Image (cartoon, rainbow, N blue to C red):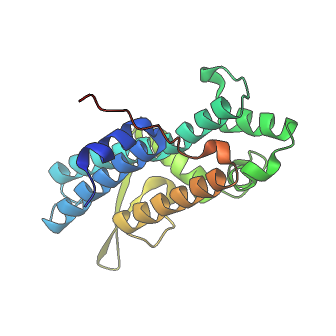
């Protein structure tokens, strides 16, 4: 069994893992609400769903933002914090001949790519959720179908949809980190205890 203090310390020291921890907590809250029969088709429950989904998306996109910040810092890209964006980090890495590091990320977010990738859709969802409702409830052939507004073509219900996007984000971030040892989680030396 792992030491709870060690887990907390690791989460506080690794902002990417902190973000995924928060994402999983919000997904669990959504699952618990669904298990209790609280679904978005009821206005009171819908309010809670909107809150949890917005928080989940905030932290999910935040995980990528934290990776970009880590890339900037550890690979010495010298971007000011406010300029650490996907496009700016990708440009700097291309200038440094490090396209290999961010190829998948660039393919997913390249503004010239006409295809809306899963990452573009999740980013749009997060952006939309800051301004308006993102849950779409519609009735077709006597059945209720609840989706997210930016990806209403998806056949997945909300929780499986979010779970899939969380896994895709984790896989993308893990792939990028695995390519560069400097991006891996720092190991801090153990402090000597006083006797």
Q: In the image, 126: left or right of 4?
A: right
| Residue 43 position in % (x across, y down) | 19, 51
Residue nearest the observer in this picture, 52 or 124: 52
What residue do we see at 51% from left, 67% from top? 153
Residue 104 visible within the image:
yes
Q: In the image, 171: left or right of 3?
A: right
Q: Quadrant of the N terminus?
A: bottom left
Look at the picture and state if 41 lies above or below 126: below
Q: Residue furthest front?
A: 195
Residue nearest the observer in this picture, 90 or 187: 187
Residue 131 visible within the image:
no
Q: In the image, 4: left or right of 73?
A: left
| Residue 8 position in % (x across, y down) | 30, 42
| Residue 75 position in % (x across, y down) | 71, 34
Q: Quadrant of the C terminus?
A: top left
What residue do we see at 55% from left, 44% from top? 64
């Amino acid at each position: 069994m792992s030491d709870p203090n060690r887990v907390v310390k690791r989460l506080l020291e690794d902002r990417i893992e902190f973000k995924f921890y928060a994402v999983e907590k919000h997904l669990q809250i959504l699952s618990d609400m669904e298990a209790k029969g609280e679904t978005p088709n009821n206005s009171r429950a819908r309010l809670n769903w909107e809150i949890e989904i917005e928080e989940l998306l905030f932290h999910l996109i935040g995980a990528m933002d934290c990776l970009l910040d880590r890339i900037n810092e550890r690979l010495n890209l010298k971007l000011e914090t406010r300029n650490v964006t996907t496009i700016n980090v990708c440009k700097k890495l291309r200038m440094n001949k490090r396209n290999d590091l961010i190829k998948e990320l660039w393919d997913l977010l390249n503004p010239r790519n006409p295809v809306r990738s899963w990452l573009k859709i999740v980013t749009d969802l997060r952006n939309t959720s800051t301004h308006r409702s993102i849950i779409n409830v519609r009735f077709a052939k006597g059945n209720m179908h609840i989706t997210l507004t930016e990806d209403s073509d998806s056949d997945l219900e909300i929780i499986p949809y979010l779970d899939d996007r969380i896994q895709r984000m984790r896989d993308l971030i893990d792939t990028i980190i695995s390519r560069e040892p400097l991006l891996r989680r720092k190991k801090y030396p153990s402090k000597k205890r006083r006797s």
